Amino acid sequence: MLNIVLYEPEIPHNTGAIARTCALTNTRLHLIEPLAFDISDKMVKRAGLDYWPLVDITVYKNYDEFLEKNPSATVYYGTTKTEQLYTDVEYKDEDFIMFGPETRGIPEDILFNDLEHCVKIPMITSIKRSLNLANSANIVAYEALRQLGFPGLK
């Protein structure tokens, strides 16, 4: 089973939309606190519609707890601070794909400790903005699922 990790997410409807994708693709969702909202928040629930009971979700107090509870995890980090494309890696069952907060991304100290697992979605560079978090998570998740043969999906 694939794992999507949101590091300190800030926008409730992005988390809700990603939760909905996780429910529909049998993908686990991991949230690393602090969250900028309550996961019972109306905006999160609305974006996830009635899919929340179907989401396999784990919440961690911080990044250290995430690492402690997933010691052998292979984690890919979605970032603009690499040249390796998300399509350049070979995803495996049980891999984790992490995305950072919408306004600042994953901290550099985390990224620079594991550069070979940093991946990016190609975009034009003249605009200093990135794709929406939910869109980015969906793009990379579906590539990983495609590589895995869309397990359990029809």
Image (tube, grey):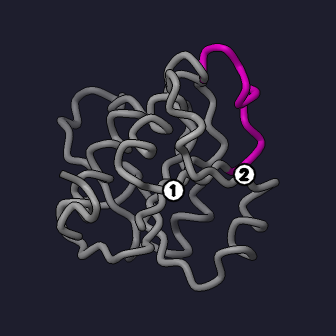
Residue 132, image quadrant: top left
Task: Of the two numbered discs 1 and 2 on the same chain, state the one appearing first in sequence.
Answer: 1
Q: CA distance from mark 1 to mark 2?
A: 11 Å
| Frontmost residue, 51 versus 148 | 51
Residue 72 on image: x %, y %: 58, 85
- Name the element at disc 2: strand
Q: Is residue 103 magenta?
A: no
- Dot 1 amino acid type: Arg
Q: Which residue is mark 1?
A: 28
In front: label 1 or label 2: 1
Residue 34, image quadrant: top right
- Dot 2 amino acid type: Val
Residue 145 on image: x %, y %: 26, 60
Range shown magenta:
32-44
Residue 136 visible to an observer of this rendering: yes
- Neighbor class of circle 2 (other Cα within 10 Å; few <14, some 14-19, many 20+) is some
Q: How would you classify the magenta stretch by its main secondary structure?
A: loop
The tally of labels here is 2
Residue 125 on image: x %, y %: 23, 37
Residue 76 on image: x %, y %: 42, 66
Give the residue at x 29% y 73%.
Answer: 91
User: Is 78 left or right of 153, judged from the image as shown?
Assistant: right
Q: Which residue is mark 2?
A: 59
Is the residue 123 above or below the residue 95 in the image? above
Give the residue at x 81% y 54%.
Answer: 61
| Frontmost residue, 68 versus 114 | 68
